Amino acid sequence: QAFKHFCQTQLGLVKRTYDDRAGYICRLLGWLHNIEKEEVETLNFARVIPLVLLTPLDTDLTPTQRFIERHRLDDAGAEAAQAVTALLDRYFDFHASSLSTQMLITASLLLATKFVYRDEIRRLGLTRVSELNRIPVMRRLRQTLNDRQRAFQAAPPVIAHESRSIPWETTVQVLNRLREKFDRAVEQYEGSRRVTGKHQGKAKRSRNQLGRYLQTFLVVGFFVILPPDRNRTVRELELGRTLKLGLIESGVFTPVERLPPKAEARWYIHLGPQDYKTGKVYGESWVEVPDTPLSNGLGFYHYLNLWISDFRPSFHPTHQVLFVTTNAIHGATVGVPLCGIKLAQRIRDAFEEQVGVPVVPQAFRKMFVTYLKSSGAEEHILAGAAVAMHHSREMQERVYDQQPHPEKIQPILDFNLRLFELVFVAEEQPLPLTEDGMIDFPLLTEEQRQLLLEGLGQEVKRRQQRVSAPWAR
């Protein structure tokens, strides 16, 4: 409890992040007990992170004694850091071959180190990272984390992006197929209820099954009709808190209950800094959920409102989270908030069923950015997508753009080809020049004028993009 209070009040961790980090520490302690055969009574923070004072506490020491004591403490701190490193190496060899898992375990132990050394940090007034690195265990753990991060960035993905991604246009088709699947199931359900005779009133599918189809369509929809956000944002959508119905006018949100009778309410995703991964950097976020028209003439809102008012209540949720567990497979409780693993599984199964590719939520962001780049989206479009997806343009370029290399260089090849075409046209039809050597535009042929304007237009666009891109300065 003390560690939880410290992480949430002193370090500002949200509950989910704390639960994840505490889970990694608990698994490490469980390994010490079950595999290393250490007694339960000895398993605590001090066993994993030894506390060694940074400076002597005794103020009555002579200068010589203080010098000797400081060197003793330095040696003890170095030994503690070495012990933590050796412990981590053994644990990694046994349990965590994944670099990403090793990074999370190391980050969790950094939190534990701040907790164990909290009194020393306060006593010596250590605040900046450089000051905290005076703690040998902290310094060694940071070095381990940095090493794992560099190795992770240099390593190829465990599963190639190409094996679990599809063209973005295909995701729109999948969304439409999921909508059709739900609509057909509703028709069958209603039709079978009208059957008379022996099977009177027996529906081919249960109402809960219809709810599962509808929820799958909506989950995928929130990734497709909007620039795709992270799994957490969709998973934690909460009616009245992060998913709000109302209207924003002149930058002010008015909830639906306070709107005039004829006003058309809209759905918005409203995230505070604590509600998404990069919230501390980008702050509060408002994104309108569009009522995207579907191929049957209805809009996305029709299905969203149908879920909220008609199907979701049938699973008896006791909370306001939008998406819920809809079946009791493997002991799951119906009606509780849908967890990240089950949401990803729902999406993966839907795409594998429809197009044979197990697309996961993480792939949506790369697929979308790659589509924008391949489509030649202009700078303001790319910038808007970055804001909606809560990351920087630099991150968009470096991480999410999976455009093949030949496709990335094609624009300059096209530009160069146009240049050659212009030169060849000029050789066959010399460009008319004025007396001072300038091009005489009124005398250009239509072909010369068209090629020249296209070349100049591409050059202007290139320069504008460079000026408006802060990372290119």
Image (cartoon, rainbow, N blue to C red):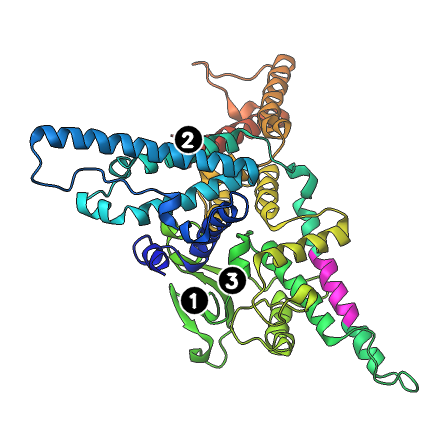
How packed mark 2 is, by other alpha carbons closer than 10 Å (few <14, some 14-19, many 20 or more), is few
Q: Is residue 436 above or below residue 116?
A: above
Residue with the mark numbered 2? 472
Looking at the magenta stretch, what is its main secondary structure? Answer: helix
Q: Where residue 442 sits in the image (x, y, percent)?
A: 53, 26
- Figure quadrant of the N terminus: bottom left
- The amino acid beneath tag 2 is Ala
Q: Where residue 386 sits in the image (x, y, percent)?
A: 48, 46
Is 376 part of what is drawn in magenta? no
How packed mark 1 is, by other alpha carbons closer than 10 Å (few <14, some 14-19, many 20 or more), is some
- The amino acid beneath tag 3 is Glu
Residue with the mark numbered 3? 236
Residue with the mark numbered 1? 248
Earlier along the polypeptide chain: callout 3 or callout 2? 3
Local SS, label 3: loop
| Residue 417: numbered disc | none
- The amino acid beneath tag 1 is Ile
Q: Which residues are magenta?
A: 175-185
Is 176 part of what is drawn in magenta? yes
Q: Is residue 145 above or below residue 174?
A: above
Front of the two marks 3 and 2: 3
